[in-house]
Image: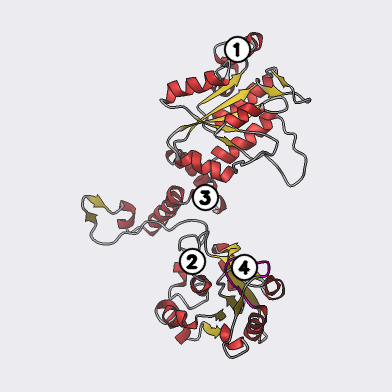
Amino acid sequence: MKYEIITIFPEFFDSVFSCGILSKAREKGLVDIKIRDLRNFAEGKHKVVDDKPYGGGEGMLFLPKPLGKAIGAAKEGDEKTVVLLTSAQGRPLDGKLVRELRDYEKIVIVCGRYEGVDERVCDMHIDMEVSIGDYIVSGGEYAAAVITDSVSRLVPGVVGNSASTEDESLSDSLLSHPQYTRPETYEGVSVPEALLSGNHGEIARWRREARIKNTLKKRPDILDRAALTKDETAALCEWRETAAPDYRAYVALLHYPVYNSRLEKVSSAFTNLDIHDIARACRTYGVRKFFPVSPVKGQRELAQRVIKHWTVGAGAGFNETRSEAMRLVEIKNSLEDVTAEIEKLEGKKPEIIATDARIVEKMTGYGEMREKIMEADRPWLLLLGTGWGIAREVLDSADHTLKPVRSYGNYNHLSVRCAAAAIMDRLFSCEF
């Protein structure tokens, strides 16, 4: 594997590649790393490689001419080559990308600095921008070192025991299993018996199970990509209950004040399907209570008869799972009654998350909202609207307003029960 690294700080790599596995790989001729000083391709006495951006602004940009010449020189040869630019805007470096890069014969890495490079260089010469994480480092040299090391480890012969790269963390979207060495007992904690058994099959089974559990505990977000057997998937369903986050979520379905099609404030009617389907979604996603809200007495009485049928009436024995979901439902007169009930149950008022199909100022994305819910020690109330949406004064008083549920098209007319399921899945679903 050949690497051509273009940088304005070639001395950065003097120590990085002169020790450890990469040093030995270079000595054996398994990898060839060439560092190119960008200033050698600049013109003039001072070898200037950067300038101010057109249109003003802070920072400097790499000039297109010297960078284009450096890339051209680095690409010379008939090897299968890819040109990378280290950039915070790039594709995240993960195991999948590392394996893709391993298939090239030469990797040219442009170490980004300043505010970036002239866009024409990106369009003409760069095949891919790559980021090593959502944070800022002082220069692309750090990223270039990470890319070079991670890809080189997959080159045959670079790592002494090739099996070790196959069993490393993230190689198959699973973390490594815990490791133990002597003594057998340390401060009262013993090595797992399976590892002391001498039974290779038992050890292999223990390690596989331990890898899945370790990933569940530390990186549940990557478990979805792991290839698990049927038995492992069934066991995971049991293990994940122990890893469930302790979020405290409530849902209210507001029937007043909402808008009609003429944007007049009205009170909408309960529907049997809304109560049933949203209650089932709430039970699925771990919501503690579901509050349909209406100030109309007749509507509340009608809804209460439906709930009674499924919780204590004939329906309770007919369909236990439906009954279980309907036991979450509690009819309320107003939103104020809902927040008061939650405060009574939780000891503090809930933070209100409003939903709306329209675009308003300062809406919150689902990823950000999910992080808040999972991390904050407080109750949350997800507020759903009926009719043509929740009245403006209610939206304005909410702590957060979620962005609309959208696809790539412009059609945006989901029923409230469909939108509720989609929203709850984004906010409360299991990641594996």
Question: What's the distance in space between the residues labelled 4 and 2, CA to CA?
Answer: 15 Å
Mark linked to residue 221: 3
Residue at 69% x, 39% y is: 359
- Image quarter where the N terminus lies is bottom right
Q: Earlier in the sequence, mark 4 or mark 1?
A: 4
Mark linked to residue 137: 2
Question: Which one is in front in this view, the residue at disc 2 or the one at disc 1?
Answer: 2
The residue tagged 1 is 304
Instruction: Label 4: state its secondary structure.
Output: strand
* Most common SS among magenta residues: loop
The residue carrying pointer 1 sits among few (fewer than 14), some (14 to 19) or many (20 or more) residues within 10 Å by Cα, namely some
> What segment carries the magenta color?
54-63
Q: Nearer the viewer, residue 239 or 382?
A: 382
Q: Quadrant of residue 46?
A: bottom right
401 lies left or right of 221: right
Instruction: Label 1: state its secondary structure.
Output: helix
Q: Nearer the viewer, residue 212 or 263?
A: 263
The residue tagged 4 is 129
The picture places residue 421, in percent across and down from the top left corner, at 63, 33
Question: What's the distance in space between the residues labelled 3 and 2, CA to CA?
Answer: 25 Å
* Circle 3: residue type: Asp
Q: Earlier in the sequence, mark 3 or mark 4?
A: 4
* Circle 1: residue type: Gln
Question: Which one is in front in this view, the residue at disc 3 or the one at disc 2?
Answer: 2
Mark linked to residue 182: none
Question: Which one is in front in this view, the residue at disc 3 or the one at disc 4?
Answer: 4
The picture places residue 201, in percent across and down from the top left corner, at 41, 57
* Circle 2: residue type: Val
Residue 339 within the magenta-colored segment of the rendering:
no
* Circle 4: residue type: Glu
